[in-house]
Image (cartoon, rainbow, N blue to C red):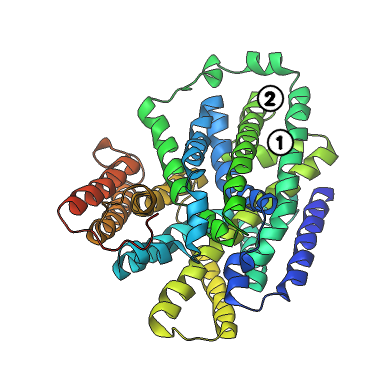
Amino acid sequence: MIYAYSVGAYLLLLIGISVVLGFRVRTQEDFMVAGRRLTWPILVGTLLATWIGSGSIFGGGTLGFEQGFAALWQPAGAWIGLALIYFIAARARRFGMFTVPDLMEARYNVAARVLSTFATIVSYTIIVSYQFRGGGIVLNLIVPGIGEFEGILLTAVFATLFTAFAGLLSVAYTDIANGTIIVTSLVVAVPALARSAGGWAQVRSNLDPSHFSLMGTMSLQEALGFFLPTMFLLLGNANMYQRFFAAKDERHARRSVAGWIVGLLVVETLVIALAVIGSSMPQFRDLEIHAHIIPTVARHGLPVLVGCLLLSAVAAIIVSTADSFLLVPATNLVRDIYQRFIHPNASERRIVWLSRAAVVLLGLVSFGMTQVHERILDAVVAAYTIYGASITPALLAIFLWRRATPAGGTASILAGFTVGVGWELWRFAVLKGEAFPLGVETIYSALLASTLALILVSLFTSPKAPDPTAG
């Protein structure tokens, strides 16, 4: 029970911070963009804690167990994407918006706002659903008598109420603690697990050489099928832009990206290393569900104190990602639908309470979606693909291609979303998840449709003038 007590104590600490900060929320800016006063160290912590989620722990754990260090193809997409984001962050803060759909309407039109809002809500509720599943897995492993379903329910209730209380203000500041415990636990756990496995030489001798190769047993097409969805989700990630909008100024927004790059390189590599080392150990080699490798080694492969620290970090990872991915679509519903079309002059108090209600509503929807994908890795790729193909090409064009037109941006979002969702529905409803339609992974078809629509429609239509986002 010591594992359950350690995780419970850490979650109580987060609740305490949230309650204190919740009473400081008075305005829409407080709830949605933390009053626009976040400095770069706080931004680094919240960006890192938000990005590292169940997709990293369970999806990355699955790939690390099965493919070895070739699993780094998935997080490498984010590393490459951040190299470009470094040059965009300051301009994003300069716009001073609340949401990505705000930008879409400013550059394109109202249809782009509505379509990007819809695409974000669909994709982000999928992402939240597998955070809930991840929490259920952890609670099932460490708390006697709690089944996976009950664990999912408890995670959903905690994360939803936590987010609803104080919005980005509490999320950002609790993520300082989350980011610290994530990095610390992994730095301690990897060498400790390697010692338990008999040393690095023993790890290598217990595994097939493919676990230490560039590709593992994957083809280049399969590797890119993990790399590209991650990269395009990162490039268009609404959580990231929301935090840039919350930065104290442009300088702090740009500096936060540099720190985030370093943090991601360290954390994602250590996560994969844990999975690889765990897969080499005889007691875990026949683990039935490969996605469980990291919480399993925390519970059964590490010294108790190190295991408690790692499991607390896993809980932090799940909660921090769930709350951030709940907050964005809730903000979209209130800011981009209610405030934009229904009640533009709503009071600050009403906006804050409606935002809280939207968090609860989307938490319920995400909980209902937890049974759609049996494997977290499948849900990761599906959500990343749908959002990345729908939003990212049109969003990047705001910063990088002045010739993009309102019609082109709108067509891009619509094409990427339609093809992405259609391809996934075809795969699971018709092919039962056994293969991709026409042998082509969803990211290729959806991204091609989105990019072609952006370029071709823009070239054959007139640009909007003047462009309010230029410069």
Residue under label 1: 297
153 sits to left or right of 471: right
- Tell me the element at label 2: loop
Quadrant of the rendering where the C terminus is positioned: bottom left
Residue under label 2: 281
Q: Position of residue 377 (x, y in %)?
A: 49, 43
342 sits to left or right of 184: left
* Residue in view at x 64 percent, y 53 percent: 43
**Other-residue count near label 1 (Cα within 10 Å), few / some / many at <14 / 14–19 / ≥20:** many
Q: Is residue 36 visible?
A: yes
Check whether the beta carbons of the residues at disc 2 and disc 1 lie within 8 A of each other: yes
In-front residue for pair 385/265: 265
* Residue in view at x 55 percent, y 45 percent: 55
Q: What is the tally of numbered marks visible in this picture?
A: 2
- Tell me the element at label 1: helix
Picture layout, residue 335 above or below residue 170: below
401 sits to left or right of 321: left
* Residue in view at x 40 percent, y 38 percent: 228
Q: Position of residue 110 (x, y in %)?
A: 32, 70
In-front residue for pair 256/295: 256
Would you identify the image quadrant in which residue 444 lies? top left
The numbered disc on residue 240 is: none
Q: Position of residue 270 (x, y in %)?
A: 66, 32
**Other-residue count near label 2 (Cα within 10 Å), few / some / many at <14 / 14–19 / ≥20:** many
Q: Position of residue 457 (x, y in %)?
A: 19, 53
Picture layout, residue 306 above or below residue 27: above
Three-letter code, disc 2: Met
In-front residue for pair 146/167: 167
Picture layout, residue 24 above or below residue 182: below
